[in-house]
Amino acid sequence: MWRHEQVLQYTGVPRVDSIDSAQQLIQNFRSRFREHRSGLVWAIASRSDGRVIGESSIFRLQEEHRKAEIGCTFGPSGWGRGYAREALTAVVKYLFNDLPFFRLNRLVAETDPRNASAIRLLESLGFRQEALLHDYYFERGQFVDQYIYTLLRREQNTPVGQ
């Protein structure tokens, strides 16, 4: 999925065009958790054939502030099928109910304002737009804005336990 320009257009992830670059990306994901306990990435596989169609991640885990960020990316074969909603629903539930490190209070998601499908998804999950950061990242030769969406423990639509 990291080799498709349509997938990468709203991310800062470099294009993966070889096995070596894919292995390096996977190693970077692994080190976030193993070395820094600051992130975790799950592969999302199709139930029908077990093929990886996307990923969902948590990163920037900050125990002191009881917050984390989430994200997800799917290849074209996973678009428009509800997989992202299913994955993020499970991740949000895990983070607020079962995170073993600390009791999460604030969950953050960033998205490019042009990414209408991500905005719809986040809002449908109860996230609210908190900020628009202008020229926040320099990606693919240009500055891009970012929306900051948040979900607070107290603002969730459904109870998630203590």
Image: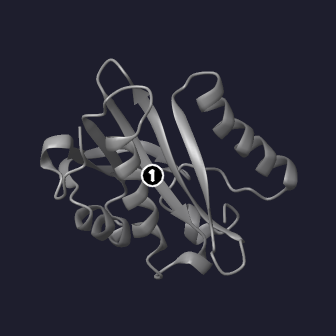
- Image spot of residue 99 (x, y percent): 41, 36
User: Element at badge 1?
Assistant: strand
x 44%, y 31%: residue: 100
Q: Residues within 10 Å of mark 1 (few under 14, many from 20)?
A: some
138 relative position to 162: left or right? right
Q: Which residue is mark 1?
A: 71
* Quarter that holds the N terminus: bottom right
Please say if 118 is above or below 154: below
Please say if 40 is above or below 5: above
Outermost residue toward the top?
A: 64
x 19%, y 57%: residue: 158
- Image spot of residue 115 (x, y percent): 37, 67
Please say if 11 is above or below 103: below
x 61%, y 71%: residue: 75
User: Is 142 in front, or is 34?
Assistant: 34
- Image spot of residue 80 (x, y percent): 46, 82
Check disc 1 and give the amino acid type. Gly
Outermost residue toward the front?
A: 161
